[in-house]
Amino acid sequence: MGFVRPALIVLLGMLAGASATPRTAAAVDHPSLFGMAETRSENLRPFTKWTWMVGRYRTEQSLELAPCAQLGALKCRLADWRRFLATLEGKPRTEQILAVNTYMNRRSYIEDLPNYGVPDYWATPREFLTRDGDCEDYAIAKFMSLRTLGFKPDELRLVVLQDLNLNVAHAVLVVYHEGKALLLDNQIRQVVETSQVRHYRPLYSINEQSWWLHKPMQISRATP
């Protein structure tokens, strides 16, 4: 992702005013992301790039188990990926998280315009592993890797945020594990807690079930 686009600003304004609803007691209680408050909605219809990617991914999953000879050399990367995930089955979750982050961060970064001919394209793991990709593509591939390993949707979020140092929009994966919000980022080699990162301001986060709008926390002032 590059600088925050006007369309994104308009989308966020529309969602802030209409779609998001306060997080209820029924929602999973997670640590705050980067010290921000959040409101939750189950209406994913505005997020067409995300929902279209999820739909494409579900139709492509059968290819992941196909023999390489049927797919061609580049698409054998799908089989390599599934063999890699198989080596992590039954391992401690911390080890799975670290390994998935390292595996995907080895891919090369490429912007959407030269890669797909459009300014913003959200790739499936198959597309990312065969064509590389940009920040949200790393995050999506990590998301689906951990889902394959048995992580639940409410343990994972793709987060679209603003990098305050570079003044650009960025996307990462956050994994909730053992009471911590862990950051899986193609720009940071290590997996760290989101509370350790000061230069990210989350705009919204999303998984297969819900999305969350993020705003600064309001500090209550005691009355004299």
Image: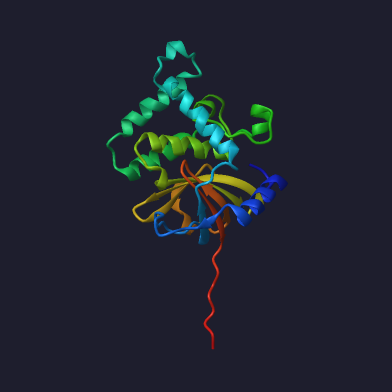
Report the residue that reaches farthest toward the left: 90
Q: Which image quadrant: the C terminus?
A: bottom right
Compared with 34, 1 (above or below) is above
Task: Please name whichever residue, 191 or 43, is drawn nearer the observer in this view of the structure.
Answer: 43
Compared with 71, 20 (above or below) is below
Picture coordinates of residue 189 (x, y %)?
Answer: 48, 44
Left of 135 or right of it: where is 87? left
Task: Please name whichever residue, 45 or 95, is drawn nearer the observer in this view of the structure.
Answer: 45
Picture coordinates of residue 52 (x, y %)?
Answer: 56, 33
Q: Look at 69% across and 49% down and name the residue there.
A: 10
Q: Look at 42% across and 21% down and name the residue there.
A: 62
Q: Look at 50% across and 26% down and name the residue there.
A: 126
What is the total number of numbered labels drawn onto the structure image? 0
Report the residue that reaches farthest toward the top: 69
Task: Please name whichever residue, 38 or 136, is drawn nearer the observer in this view of the structure.
Answer: 38
Q: What color scheme is it?
A: rainbow
Compared with 19, 148 (above or below) is above
The picture quadrant where one finds residue 193 is bottom left
Residue 164 in view here: no
Q: Look at 68% across and 35% down and name the residue there.
A: 119
Picture coordinates of residue 23 (x, y %)?
Answer: 47, 58
Q: Which image quadrant: the N terminus?
A: top right
Residue 70 in view here: yes
Picture coordinates of residue 182 (x, y %)?
Answer: 43, 50
Report the residue that reaches farthest toward the right: 6
